[in-house]
Amino acid sequence: MIVLNILCKNEKKVFDITNFLKKNAYALETYVDVNKLVEGKKEKVFVRIFFLTKSLLFESICNDLVQKFESEELTIYSSPVTQIEQSYWEKLREKLKPV
């Protein structure tokens, strides 16, 4: 399992991206937070979408997102999950796309 992070500069696309992830069984639920990057006197807003998923889905998710949202500048990366509560793991394994 991994926590997959997607950084998006377009706040208006977040709803479309999260719906796409759920519809395609890449994510059971998604979380969103808004971050500001400060460079000198300028601020840039980034939205981070993050969720738990199967590590073997990483390449498929990346390819599908880049293809579906090609006009967006997305940064996609993951972090490993070493432990997860058993009942939630079963739920994810059952409902996420098979690999």
Image (cartoon, rainbow, N blue to C red):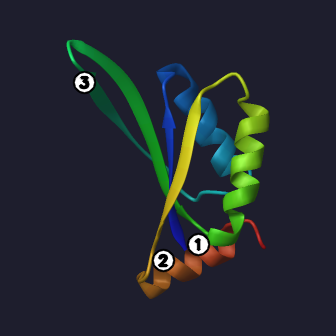
Under circle 3, the secondary element is strand
Q: Secondary structure at mark 1?
A: helix
- Name the residue type under label 1: Leu
| Residue 67, horizontal then vertical, whole percent | 79, 36
Disc 3 residue type? Val
Picture layout, residue 8 above or below residue 49? above
Residue pictured at 62% horizontal, 70% vertical: 55
Q: Residues within 10 Å of mark 2 (few under 14, many from 20)?
A: few
Res 75 → quadrant: top right
Neighbours of disc 3 within 10 Å: few (<14), some (14-19), many (20+): few
Query: In the image, 41: left or right of 34?
Result: left
The numbered mark at residue 38 is: 3
Quadrant occupied by the C terminus? bottom right
**Residue type indicated by callout 2:** Tyr
Whether residue 29 sits left or right of residue 83 in the image: it is: right
Q: CA distance from mark 3 to mark 2?
A: 37 Å
Dot 3 or dot 2: first in sequence order is 3
Residue 31 image label: none
Is 83 left, or right, of 51 in this rendering? left
Between 18 and 50, which is closer to the camera in this rendering? 50
Badge 1 is on which residue?
Answer: 92
Residue highlighted by disc 2: 88
Q: Are marks 1 and 2 in contact (CB under 8 Å)?
A: yes
Identify the residue at horizontal 30%, vertical 28% (top origin): 37
Task: Kindly tell me whether residue 84 is visible in this rendering.
Answer: yes
Q: Spatial distance from mark 1 to mark 2, Cα to Cα?
A: 6 Å
Q: Separation of disc 3 and disc 1 at Cα?
A: 36 Å
